[in-house]
Image (tube, grey):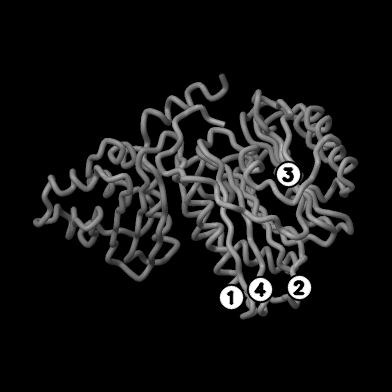
């Protein structure tokens, strides 16, 4: 947990996430790195629980990611187990890191009655330090699983986060109410390439793995893959969706079934909420920024252009300095490698048009831009004038506090 000031965008309190039928959990102080706080979370899904997931696209993933990708497709008649530790990412730790993963899985399997090969493992924290798995294995037999505990779980998986992150929603499937709970962690090393944080979403819905995977993949794009803090894609991170099957509705075997319309809406709401909380807790954040792109040649092109602007250090530092520097925005549009024409490009901040037709807007007044940039939440709107492609992405400013946090992260 960071000792920095809590993000100005932090929720007033952690939401009430109700117990979910078919799931129990517990946290513990394993002492991986932190002292006087929890750093280990275990989530147990009853036998029959289905799991879907997406993982980082970083080409140097951690040993827990390699293990969990394989575990995703494992078949088991026993319970499904998720084990997460904070303090070390167990990445780039060679054979010691791989051994730690194996030791953790075997220890958890013995303590909780799960199949080791099907256990989802995740670690978050410093890269280049092997996990001392014995610290986790020692805690497993002492952990008392309970149906409640989502806030404690969200706190246990934090690193530089300034607050725990959670969300919940309900939906109807064929007239039966189901619940979706989710927690996430992330504050730095956040850039979309699925995934760039840790996020765990669970539901009591009765849905098979292939349906969960399709639903999750469809909702990743406009949520977790549309946020960025610093353009760095983590080596470790994971988004899981688990379904216990405890809800008494007819099992759905087609992700396109109309009976899932409300569930898809609720799933989107939870994923969007969690992803927004991550970017609003960006390391050193003072301003939250929404970038809306229209008029691109395609939605994919619009997204790439939006991310180019969102990731530009020059744009982000200008926002931190409350400078409506539209020239930097033009630069970031042009460097994206996507079709763009400066002579038809238009740029707004909030309600103020800054540039159009390849030059500053005649109606724009610097004092209007300066006044708008003092707001905590900034909207930048771009129209490429080339087509129908649209996208919205979310980022934050880049302040000296970001440097302070990351300059001594290992100390």
Which residue is at a point 64% across and 40% down the rendered structure image?
236
Instruction: Decide: few, some or many residues near mark 1? Use Cα within 10 Å; few <14, some 14-19, many ≥20.
Output: some
Q: Which residue is mark 1?
A: 261
Query: x and y percent of residue 211 in the render?
Result: 69, 69
Q: Earlier in the sequence, mark 3 or mark 4?
A: 3
Residue 270's mark? none
Q: Earlier in the sequence, mark 2 or mark 1?
A: 2
Q: Position of residue 201 (x, y in %)?
A: 65, 55
Q: Residue 391 location, x and y as percent?
A: 40, 61
Inspect this view and state whether residue 91 appears: no
Circle 3 residue:
66
Foreground of the two, 318 or 297: 318
Q: CA distance from mark 1 to mark 4?
A: 9 Å
Q: Could you classify mark 4 by the number of other residues whose Cα lies within 10 Å: few (under 14), some (14-19), or many (20 or more)?
A: some
Q: Quadrant of the C terminus?
A: top right
Q: Is residue 146 left or right of residue 283?
A: right
* Residue drawn at 84 percent across, 48 percent down: 117
Callout 2 touching callout 1 (CB < 8 Å): no
Look at the numbered discs 2 and 3 and tell me whether their residues touch, using CB distance below 8 Å.
Answer: no
Q: Is residue 314 above or below residue 47?
A: above
Q: Residue 175 or 259: which is nearer the viewer?
A: 175
Query: Which numbered disc flags the more N-terminal residue, 1 or 4?
Result: 4
In this figure, which residue is indicated by the disc labeled 4? 255
Badge nearest the viewer, 4 or 2: 2
Cα separation between marks 3 and 1: 33 Å
The secondary element bearing badge 4 is classed as loop
């Amino acid at each position: 947990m960071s000792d920095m000031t809590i993000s100005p965008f932090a929720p007033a309190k952690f939401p009430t996430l109700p117990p979910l039928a078919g799931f129990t959990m517990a946290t513990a102080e394993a002492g991986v790195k932190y002292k006087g706080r929890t750093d280990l979370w275990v989530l147990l899904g009853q036998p029959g629980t289905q799991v879907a997931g997406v993982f980082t696209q970083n080409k140097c993933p951690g040993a827990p990611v390699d293990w969990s990708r394989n575990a995703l497709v494992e078949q088991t008649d026993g319970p499904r187990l998720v084990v997460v530790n904070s303090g070390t990412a167990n990445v780039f730790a060679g054979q010691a890191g791989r051994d730690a993963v194996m030791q953790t899985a075997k220890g958890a399997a013995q303590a909780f009655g799960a199949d080791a090969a099907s256990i989802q493992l995740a670690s978050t924290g410093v890269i280049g330090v092997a996990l001392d798995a014995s610290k986790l294995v020692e805690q497993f037999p002492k952990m008392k699983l309970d149906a409640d505990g989502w806030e404690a779980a969200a706190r246990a998986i934090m690193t530089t986060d300034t607050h725990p992150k959670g969300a919940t929603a309900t939906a109807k499937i064929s007239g039966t109410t189901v619940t979706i709970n989710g927690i996430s962690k992330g504050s730095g090393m956040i850039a979309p390439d699925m995934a760039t944080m840790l996020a765990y979403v669970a539901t009591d819905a009765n849905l098979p793995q292939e349906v969960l995977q399709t639903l999750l993949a469809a909702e990743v794009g406009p949520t977790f893959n549309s946020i960025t803090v610093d353009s760095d894609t983590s080596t470790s991170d994971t988004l899981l969706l688990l379904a216990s099957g405890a809800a008494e509705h007819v099992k759905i075997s087609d992700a396109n079934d109309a009976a899932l319309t409300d569930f898809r809406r609720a799933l989107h709401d939870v994923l969007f909420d969690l992803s927004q909380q991550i970017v609003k807790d960006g390391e050193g954040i003072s301003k939250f920024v929404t970038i809306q792109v229209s008029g691109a040649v395609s939605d994919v092109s619009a997204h790439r252009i939006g991310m180019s602007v969102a990731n530009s250090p020059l744009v982000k530092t200008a926002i931190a300095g409350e400078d409506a520097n539209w020239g930097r925005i033009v630069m970031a549009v042009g460097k994206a490698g996507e079709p763009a024409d400066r002579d038809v490009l238009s740029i707004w901040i909030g309600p103020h048009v800054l540039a159009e037709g390849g030059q500053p807007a005649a109606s724009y007044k610097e004092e209007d831009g300066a006044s708008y940039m003092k707001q905590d939440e900034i909207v930048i709107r771009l129209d490429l004038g080339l087509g129908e492609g649209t996208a919205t992405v979310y980022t934050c400013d880049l302040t000296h506090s970001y440097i302070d946090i990351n300059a001594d992260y290992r100390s």
